[in-house]
């Protein structure tokens, strides 16, 4: 069982990479650009905390981050853009002209990393909360500090991406939970997932959604649905999204959250292999986003629609072999976890040979290095994701796709 769970933790992003986009609700493919790298768009402030204010969306996702909501960590004075990440592929060998593949490649099938319901329920039955290892995790954090400061430290630790930092983040989350100083608790299961504890996250989401005040909470339903997809529990995930669609908030948030949920349905059906339903729901999201009139965040709706359009475009897209790409350097940007991700894609000998990534991601789990490398090595945009960094992964894939459109990709 331990081996299977370890395998799951390494491959979890491969299955839920698309569906988690809807959960994190800040990702997307940006507008086409050939301009030099610039700063991320500014955004209105969403209050993080327990209650909803007059303009606060009761369905607001706790996964939304500075690209749409200025969390405290964005204003930290020592935050500076990361240095560009340069990923180069091997120099293409001179070969005979490849035989072009049909434009309509076979659609991607659900990943073999999906797990059965029985395995999940067995893992839940064996799960010890808190786990024995938690007692051995040390931290220098002052637990007298309030949750508003603690959550920033937790995100900082998760952003480092190593196991020790993840476990320290989990310990701090657990300690604040025991202290009963963790807001309304919606970040507890989220940090379990980002800390590479998917089984614990499933239990935490189930417990949180079972509380009367949380029943019908859109972000919780979509988050748990994403985790169910990892285990191949597609019917259960669909039922959760059905519940989410029946519990949309009232105006002025209705249209935007309806589009979000259609996007989530599209991700589910794409992972399930039901491509016709995926296309229909992606199309509904693209159609509805421009009609939304939320009190804030409206300036990002066009880019949200573009993000979904990119997923729709790449839904049945396979290998880049035989795509007749023209050589050159092509630039694009996409909306990531903490603002714009800027990509410079180089094509040499008709293949992607180099991808430069410039970003300000806080929690990216080294995906800015791993995902470009996988694209180059596989010569494909259908690549596995990285657990806990799905937004960044999909932004890189979507941005690369749009850059390659400029190189003649059809």
Image: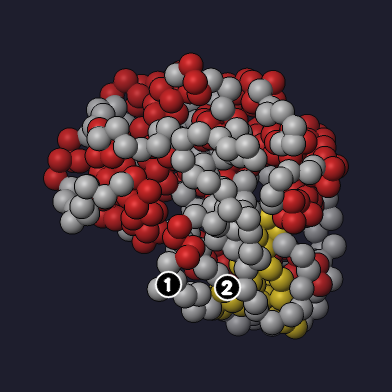
Q: Quadrant of the N terminus?
A: top left
Taking depth in this image into account, of 186 and 116 the one nearest to the observer is 186
Image vertical order of residue 139 relative to residue 219, above or below: below
Say which residue label 1 marks. Answer: 77
**Pair 1/2: label in front:** 1
Tell me which corner region of the image, top left, top right, bottom left or bottom right, holds residue 204: top left
Q: Which residue has dot 2 on it?
A: 357
Estimate the x, y position of residue 383 in percent, counting from the top left: 59, 55
Q: Quadrant of residue 274?
A: top right
* Residue 377 coordinates in the image, percent (x, y): 57, 67
- x 28%, y 39%: residue: 176
Q: How is the image coloured?
A: secondary structure
Task: Determine the secondary structure under disc 1.
Answer: loop
Q: Give how far across and how far down residue 108 sits, in percent.
A: 68, 44
* Relative side of 119 to 81, left or right: left
Residue at the spot x=42%, y=32% of the render? 184
| Residue 31, x across and y down, in percent | 77, 65
């Amino acid at each position: 069982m331990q081996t299977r769970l370890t395998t799951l933790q390494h491959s979890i992003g491969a299955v839920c990479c698309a569906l988690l986009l809807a959960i994190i609700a800040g990702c997307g493919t940006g507008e086409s650009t050939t301009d030099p790298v610039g700063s991320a768009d500014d955004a209105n402030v969403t209050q993080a905390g327990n209650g909803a204010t007059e303009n606060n969306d009761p369905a607001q996702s706790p996964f939304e981050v500075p690209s749409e909501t200025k969390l405290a960590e964005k204003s930290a004075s020592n935050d500076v853009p990361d240095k560009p990440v340069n990923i180069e592929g091997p120099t293409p060998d001179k070969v005979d002209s490849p035989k072009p593949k049909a434009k309509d490649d076979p659609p991607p099938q659900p990943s073999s990393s999906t797990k059965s319901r029985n395995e999940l329920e067995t893992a839940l039955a064996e799960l010890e909360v808190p786990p024995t290892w938690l007692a051995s995790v040390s931290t220098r954090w002052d637990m007298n500090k309030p949750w508003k400061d603690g959550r920033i430290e937790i995100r900082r630790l998760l952003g480092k991406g190593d196991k020790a930092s993840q476990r320290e983040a989990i310990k701090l989350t657990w300690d604040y939970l025991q202290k009963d100083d963790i807001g309304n608790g919606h970040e507890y299961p989220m940090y379990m997932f980002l800390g590479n504890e998917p089984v614990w996250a499933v239990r935490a989401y189930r417990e949180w959604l079972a509380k009367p005040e949380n029943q019908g909470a859109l972000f919780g339903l979509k988050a748990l649905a994403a985790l169910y997809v990892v285990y191949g529990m597609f019917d259960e995930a669909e039922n959760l999204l059905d519940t989410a669609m029946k519990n949309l908030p009232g105006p002025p948030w209705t249209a935007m959250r309806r589009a979000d949920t259609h996007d989530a349905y599209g991700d589910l059906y794409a992972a399930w292999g039901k491509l016709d339903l995926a296309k229909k729901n992606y199309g509904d999201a693209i159609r509805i986003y421009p009609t939304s009139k939320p009190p804030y965040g409206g300036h990002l709706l066009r880019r949200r629609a573009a993000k979904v359009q990119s997923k729709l475009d790449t839904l049945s897209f396979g290998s880049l072999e035989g795509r007749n790409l023209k050589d050159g350097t092509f630039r694009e940007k996409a909306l990531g976890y903490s603002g714009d991700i800027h990509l410079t894609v180089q094509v040499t000998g008709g293949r992607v040979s180099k991808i430069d990534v410039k970003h300000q991601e806080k929690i990216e789990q080294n995906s800015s290095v791993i995902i470009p490398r996988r694209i180059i090595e596989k010569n494909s945009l259908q690549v596995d994701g990285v657990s806990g960094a799905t937004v960044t992964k999909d932004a890189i894939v979507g941005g690369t796709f749009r850059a390659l459109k400029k190189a003649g990709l059809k």
